[in-house]
Image (spheres, grey):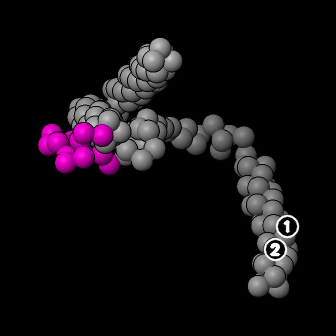
Amino acid sequence: MKKIILLSILFLFAGIPILANEVNEAQSDYQEQVESLDPSEITQMPAPVKTEKTLVVPPKWTDFCESGYENAVYKDSHDVFNIFSFVKSERVKKNYWAERRVSFENYLKTCNALDDEAKVTCYQELTKSEEQKNDLYKLKRKQLLYENNIELNRR
């Protein structure tokens, strides 16, 4: 196994200079073609039309969701073990992330229906909104833990 890895590294290092030479040769060929042109020919050539299309990448739900709750599904029913507080709190947490995911997907669908220029701003607004929701969620969790900690210390 070590021999295979060492051989592959050796071939990789041997191939890099070869690829670099091919790029340099292509650049030098292009420069020779440009230098061989007559200046009057250059002015007669039509200017290339630049049609740059920006790549619009939509935000992903996994960027905002807490780990483990990416595919949470809303459950309205109560479990048999609902008498335990950790089971109830876990259900509440799953429901929260399930509602957030549905909201995110609906917002994303409205963004996808727009044209490219509007998509960029819509995606930025969606990202900003989700980050604000995450900040609020973290703040509420800290507050809840703080309040519960105070109640536990009072007993």
In the image, what residue type sits under mark 2? Ile
Q: Residue at x 81, y 59 (%)?
A: 24
Q: Nearer the viewer, residue 64 or 45?
A: 64
Which label was assigned to residue 127? none
Residue 72 sits in quarter: top left
- In the image, residue 121 sits, relative to residue 115, either above or below, namely above
Measure the C-alpha gap from mark 2 to mark 1. Answer: 14 Å
Number of numbered callouts drawn: 2
- In the image, residue 138 sits, relative to residue 51, either above or below, namely above
| Residue 132 x, y percent position in the rendering | 42, 20
Q: Quadrant of the C terminus?
A: top left
**Residue 21 lies in the magenta-colored region:** no
Helix, strand or loop at mark 1: helix
| Residue 107 x, y percent position in the rendering | 26, 31
| Residue 82 x, y percent position in the rendering | 23, 41
Q: Which residue is mark 2?
A: 9
Q: Nearer the viewer, residue 26 or 89?
A: 89
Relative side of 127 to 118, left or right: right
Which label was assigned to residue 17? 1
Per the rendered image, the range of residues in magenta is: 71-84
Q: Quadrant of the N terminus?
A: bottom right
Question: Could you tell which of marks 2 and 1 lies nearer the N-terminus?
Answer: 2
Is residue 145 shown to the viewer in this render? yes
Q: Residue at x 41, y 38 (%)?
A: 65
Determine the main secondary structure of the stretch shown in magenta.
Answer: loop
Is residue 104 shown to the viewer in this render? no
Helix, strand or loop at mark 2: helix
Q: Residue at x 81, y 82 (%)?
A: 2
Q: Residue at x 85, y 67 (%)?
A: 17
